[in-house]
Image (cartoon, rainbow, N blue to C red):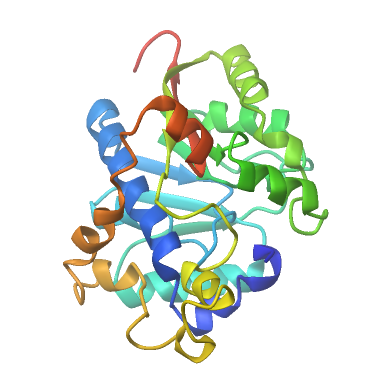
Amino acid sequence: MSINITWPQYFGNYHEGVGTTYERFILHKYFEFIRKKCDVQSVLESPSFGMTGISGINSMWWAWKGVEVTITDSKHDRISLIKEVWQKLGLKLNIKYYPDITDSIFPFKDKSFDLGWNFAALWFVSDLEKFLKELARVCKKAVFICIPNKSNIFCKLRVSSSNLEEIPYPDNIDAKKIIHILGVQGWDVKERGYFDVPPWPDIAMKKEELLAKIGFKKNKDINSEKDYICILDFFNGKKIAMEKEIMKYSFLENSPILVRKLWAHHQYFIFEPKDGLK
């Protein structure tokens, strides 16, 4: 299920499923850690497209906490839809159209942002080195990179069976390559590890749909009101207990490293300037 094809459907039906919702709440834990450690007041998320579910809301937590948020996206129609979602919640967003790093540089001055980050988006970047150099240039305190976990068997299966439409640049999720490029730019890895370790496999579909496919749930029920879940209802206050409900699935997040390495859906790296925080 290529997100290049499925992304529009989420703007018509906000139901994201428990898997994507879980990923979002897990990300919040790392956001909180980075925010406290680096005193983050401004954030750039680029590229913002890479995660299943509603596009362009990965950084909503930052705005919810009063941090200035800027994101980039490569499609004008998607930008319009993203703006509508943020406006409905009354959260501030600066969103920029940015087609491809190959042909241009970021429209931002040096050290414009405390934090630059992205989630599972690097395999949509045509020139990884140019992109990471630009990200390093416009950030001053931290860079947070999250990539699919190549040690996870389901990730391997997805990459091996994908086509260029689904995953244009699969080699971009090479950890050594990312670390080397940012290292040359003066950034060191300060924290790294495996995260997003739910009890279900890493597959590119809603877990409710998986249950329907293997016979544990009826197809007509997979988008029922009972199953409907979207983190927007947490941010707008309709379901303030959502985080507690979702985090009950997080019992594997602190499991032994071998378990996380083989089962985690993602790997993360937190970079800081080699000469220390400014």
Question: Residue drawn 65% across and 53% down?
Answer: 98
Question: In front here: 65 or 51?
Answer: 51
Instruction: From this view, report whether residue 154 is shown above or below residue 271.
Output: below
Question: In front here: 210 or 179?
Answer: 210
> On the rendered image, what quadrant is the N terminus found in?
bottom right
Residue 224, percent from left and from top? 40, 88
Q: Is residue 174 in view?
A: yes
Question: Residue drawn 25% across and 68% down?
Answer: 234
Question: Residue drawn 54% across and 70% down?
Answer: 210
Quarter holding residue 190 = top left
Q: Residue furthest right?
A: 164
Judge from the rendering whether residue 31 lies leftward or rightward of residue 188; answer left or right: left
Residue 38, percent from left and from top? 29, 27
Question: In front here: 108 or 18?
Answer: 18
Quarter holding residue 49 = bottom right
Instruction: From this view, report whether residue 147 is shown above or below residue 72.
Output: above
> On the rendered image, what quadrant is the C terminus found in?
top left
Instruction: From this view, report whether residue 260 is shown above or below residue 121.
Output: above
Instruction: From this view, report whether residue 42 is shown above or below residue 110.
Output: below
Residue 239, percent from left and from top? 20, 73
